[in-house]
Amino acid sequence: MTIDLSGLITPADKLREAKERKRSEITAACQAAIDGGFFFDGHHYDSDQRSQTNIIGTCNAVAAGVPLPEGFIWRTADNQDVPMDVAGIIALGAALLAHINAQYAKSWQLKAMADQAESMGDLSDITWQTHAE
């Protein structure tokens, strides 16, 4: 009698699949953090895709020499109007870049931890909040 064991799922298979799920979870958390806004100069700004496009586009325009309209403001996530000049816009763009890069760096570190996990318990200990902001 021959028993076919090819269809059995081993503990190593389960851990590999759990690692793949953890990586997907981290990717989703990273995107949510990127889109969740950022702080700059004491204000909270939106950073969803539309806001990223607006900030980057405005930075590119002023860098190309396009003047800002007189009395130019940027609206914060909580609807406060903040006066901005060219230097302020460039600094806002730099803060957005730093925010996005920090989220990616955090995700890369957590994914490396997931890849190195040796047990399901190790994996369950890895959450977006386990890494210092």
Image (cartoon, rainbow, N blue to C red):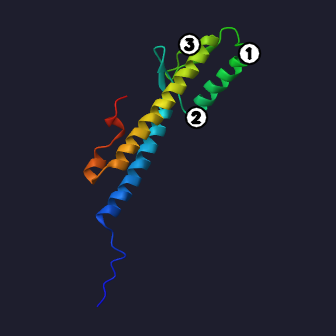
Q: Secondary structure at mark 3?
A: strand
Which amino acid is tagged 2? Answer: Gln
- Of the numbered discs 1 and 2, the one sitting upstream in the chain is 2
- Could you say which disc has been placed on residue 65 in the image? 1
Which residue reaches farthest bottom? 1
Between 32 and 30, the residue placed more toward the observer is 30
Q: Residue 10 vs residue 26: left or right? A: left
Residue drawn at (48%, 14%) of the image: 41
Which amino acid is tagged 1? Answer: Gly
Distance Cα–Cα, label 1 vs label 2:
24 Å
Q: Residue 70 in the image: x percent, y percent?
A: 69, 8
Whether residue 19 appears in this view of the structure is yes
Q: Residue 22 vs residue 61: left or right? A: left
Which amino acid is tagged 3? Answer: Val
Q: Residue 121 in the image: x percent, y percent?
A: 25, 50
Callout 3 crowding tier (Cα within 10 Å): few <14, some 14–19, many ≥20: some
- Of the numbered discs 1 and 3, the one sitting upstream in the chain is 1
Residue drawn at (45%, 44%) of the image: 27
Q: Which residue is mark 3?
A: 82
| Disc nearest the viewer among 1 and 3 | 1
Q: Are marks 3 and 2 in contact (CB under 8 Å)?
A: no
Q: Secondary structure at mark 1?
A: loop
Q: Residue 130 in the image: x percent, y percent?
A: 31, 36
Residue drawn at (45%, 38%) of the image: 30
Say if 90 sits above or below 126 in the image. Answer: above
Q: Which residue is mark 2?
A: 49
How many badges with numbers are in the image? 3
